[in-house]
Image: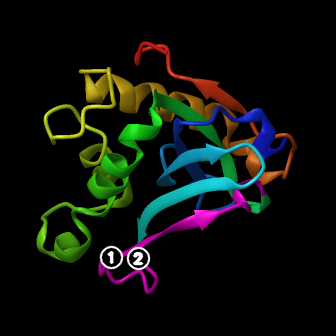
Amino acid sequence: MSLDTLEPGGLYVVLFIQNVPPPKDDFHWGLYLHKYKNIGGTKYHIWDPDRDWVWVADHGMTTGLFKSHALVGLFQIARVSPEWECEVDRAARSFDDSLNQRPGIGCDVWLFWTPAPGNGTVVLKCKDLEALKAEILDFANQNAQAAAKAVRPRPIIMSRLCGL
């Protein structure tokens, strides 16, 4: 499992277990936009470092996506052409200054604001976000135990709902 196996321009949901054993539907969610086969891409996520419901944006280039022991897998939701990469980056960062002013914020809620239809950056062809979330959770729940046992390689799949 390496960056070579990912599609340049692929937009992936990355999921991480938070506890061992992993409870059902309990994951940390992020986005990863893969740019270059050997160089990596940008990971976008928000997190609550002190577990006090104060969320912090944490975005940046990474080559170490597969190094996390907590990684469940990658779930591709879109293909982003090079001319749209800046728009995806803008959309992912657009809530950074107001994260804690938004009721119900969490990493999964934030994730669906970013590529959602109607937010100005239409890269996601899937219109039913609840069905997409269910598809992603099904994938994550099926692979959580393997992540807890550090089974390699981690799975990489494409959404059936997003027209890939």
Q: Give the side of residue 125 with respect to residue 18, left or right.
A: left
Provide the residue designation for mark 1: 55
Q: Position of residue 135 (x, y in %)?
A: 46, 25
Quick one: label 1, few (<14), some, or many (20+) residues within 10 Å? many
Q: Residue at x 48, y 54 (%)?
A: 30
Which one is earlier in the sequence, the residue at label 2 or at label 1? 2
Q: Which amino acid, mark 1?
A: Trp
Q: Position of residue 108 (x, y in %)?
A: 36, 51
Judging depth in this view, the residue of 38 and 133 nearest the camera is 38
Q: In which image quadrant can residue 74 be found?
A: top right
**Residues marked 2 and 1 touching at CB (< 8 Å):** yes
Magenta-tinted stretch = 48-66
Q: Residue at x 54, y 57 (%)?
A: 42
Q: Which amino acid, mark 2?
A: Asp
Location of residue 89 with respect to 100 vertically, above or below:
above
Residue 48's disc is: 2
Q: In which image quadrant can residue 84 be found?
A: top left
Q: Residue at x 69, y 32 (%)?
A: 156
Judging depth in this view, the residue of 103 and 38 nearest the camera is 38
Q: CA distance from mark 2 to mark 1?
A: 5 Å
Asked if one can make out residue 110 in the rendered structure from this viewpoint, the answer is yes
Q: Position of residue 83 (x, y in %)?
A: 39, 39
